[in-house]
Image (tube, grey):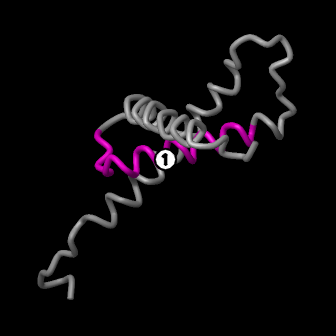
Amino acid sequence: MSFWGGIGGILGWIVAGIVLGLLAKAILPGRQAIPWWATILGGIVGAFIGNAVAGSLGYENANGGLPWFRWLLDVVGAVVVIAIASSVWSRRSVPARRGKWNR
């Protein structure tokens, strides 16, 4: 079994990216003017970050139930990534002002 888990695993990461990206955009205040693909990618990267942090903290789902702590870290990771992407994207998409003082 590969890291991605085949086509089902890739689709799972995409669905998780959509859910986490939209949840992160709902949590963040204001409007995030980033495209839909950046939202999905931010959710996927946030999930990777959340899983990496949970693993580095030694978290194991020993009881076999729902991994709430890991999911919480996934959401936090997605919020951070979407916030960074939103600030970078908004600076990138603002046209330069051409005026008397901005030459």
Of 98 and 41, the residue lying toward us: 41
Q: Residues within 10 Å of mark 1 (few under 14, many from 20)?
A: many
Amino acid type, residue under disc 1 in the picture:
Gly
Which residue is pictured at 63% across the width and 43% down the height?
A: 6
- State left or right for residue 39 relative to residue 101: right
> Residue sitting at 45 percent across and 34 percent down?
24
Residue at image point 27% right, 64% down: 93
Is 89 colored magenta in this rendering?
A: no
Is label 1 in a helix, a strand or a loop?
Answer: helix
The mark tally for this picture is 1
Please provide the residue range marked out in magenta. 31-53
Q: Which quarter of the figure has residue 89?
A: bottom left
Residue corresponding to mark 1: 42
With respect to residue 103, does 39 lie above or below? above
Q: Is residue 46 above or below residue 99?
A: above
In the rendered view, tell whether residue 56 sits above or below residue 62: below
Answer with the quarter of the image where residue 59 lies. top right
Residue at the far bottom in the pictured view? 103
Predominant SS of the magenta segment: helix
Q: Is residue 22 above or below residue 91?
A: above
Residue 32: say if magenta.
yes
Query: Could you tell me residue 69's position as x and y percent?
Result: 70, 22
